[in-house]
Image (cartoon, helix red, strand yellow):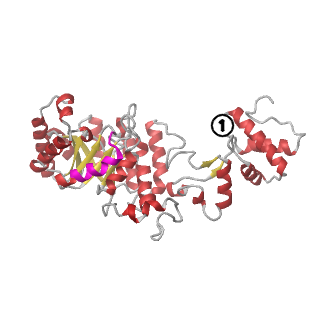
Amino acid sequence: MANQQTPWKTDHWFTSPWNHDSEVSSGYRFPEQIQIHDVTLRDGEQQSGVVFTLDEKIRIAESLAEAGVHRIEAGLPAVSTEDEKAVRAIAGRGLPAEVYAFSRCMLDDAKRAVDCGVSGVVMEIPSSRHLIELGYRWSVERAIELSVEATNYAHEQGLKVAFFPIDATRAELGDYLDLMERVATDGHMDSFVLVDTFGVLAPHAVQRFAEVTRERLQVPLETHFHMDYSLGVANSLLAAASGASVIQTTIAGLGERAGNTPMEETVMALLTLYNRDIGIKTEQLTSIARTVGEISGVQQPSNRPVTGERLFDIESGIIATWFRNSRDQDMTESVPFLPSLVGQDGPEIVYGKGSGVDSVTEALEQLGLEATADQHMAILEELKTVAIAKHGLLDLDEVAQIARKVLDPQAQSPVHGAGPS
């Protein structure tokens, strides 16, 4: 899909050559393969008010697998009987994706995960001394002993173990590394998750966080970043560029508080900004996001990156001019990537307060009408007046009423939403 000579400019997207400048790209340390580990069914459901039924979880899991998601975290079996049924059912579907369970670092939790038939388990433990002692009322030694016991058991039962230290970014650096090294030495971890539970890691700290952790523990790294400062996508990309091979995400950024790193933006940024095709069928991103939005009841902004319903609507007059002048040759002059790349329609010129003369020309062409330059301006002026009164966009029928009124001043049919003249 990408042009190796100009990876920033292809038939499908137009991003920035600065991303591939040798002074910039020489610092990239992307692993050969990057995987998505989706946590919508577990961490996404932790968003306040979100509940997925068994059938809904299976539907979401099947959609994720069909889109090429590499790993699906089906849930935490210890939460409830319903959650355990869901994990067991998804693990037994034979999906073309690895199915993981989430587990506390407790032997009983590990046994539940094994019984569900998953291929891997994400095992959590508080990593900061203050959270261990204040949040859990445990001693540090107990936390380590539980981690060692549970991770060894899961490994002995044939599960892949991703070790998940809660609140790692707020732990004292030396203390965090010492504690995690003891688990890595005495217990077992196939990978280690860089966890920013509260989304408080600054982008400039990501590289050091990743490199120091990998150097001490000598295992592959994963990421699990939150969006409290809207940095989850940026931080995940920086961690991947520092060698992390798995990125944990949710659909539409569902999750506790401000949510988790959204899969859609992360996958598209890897593809179009870094030329990293990780095997996700991007054309399915919008349909999956809207399915999850419908099921979860969480309303998304109309201009949400990648999947927003109005993302590719063009109201601004100047952008409408760019689009009309270039669309027959290259639509990416007006958008960073083609809507079809993410399963959307468009771009489309829409009509509102921000419209310009070329917006009117677009409407007249669609309506099969002709107008003089003065009539164009009169239609535009009335279009803006009506849009302001309506407090929104006009559809083509409403623009048609305005145009015919201007072109035939004898026509007195009212324009819907215009209000008194």
Q: Is residue 393 left or right of residue 61?
A: right
Q: Position of residue 152 (x, y in %)?
A: 12, 48
Report if residue 205 lies within the magenta region.
yes
Asked whether residue 73 appears in the rendered view, the answer is: no
373 or 40: nearer the eye?
373
Residue situated furthest bottom in the rendering:
5
Q: Residues within 10 Å of mark 1 (few under 14, many from 20)?
A: some
Query: How many numbered marks have been drawn onto this rendered protein structure?
Result: 1
Which residue is drawn at the image coordinates 35% and 48% (left, top)? 235
Residue 221's place in the image compared with 299, above or below, is below
Q: Secondary structure at mark 1?
A: loop
Query: Residue 116 placed where, x, y %?
Result: 23, 45
Residue lying farthest to the front in this orientation: 23
Q: Residue furthest right?
A: 410
Residue 187, image x, y percentages: 11, 48
Residue 340 visible at all: yes
Q: Which residues are magenta?
A: 200-213
- Which kind of residue does numbered mark 1 sit on? Gly
Quadrant for the C terminus, please: top right
Q: Nearer the viewer, residue 82 or 63?
A: 63
Residue located 85% across and 52% down the image: 372
Q: Answer above or below: position of 374 versus 16.
A: above
Q: Main secondary structure of the magenta part?
A: helix
Read off the residue under disc 1: 392
Residue at left offset 19%, top offset 41%: 112
Percent x, y for residue 337? 53, 57
Q: Is residue 9 left or right of residue 90?
A: right
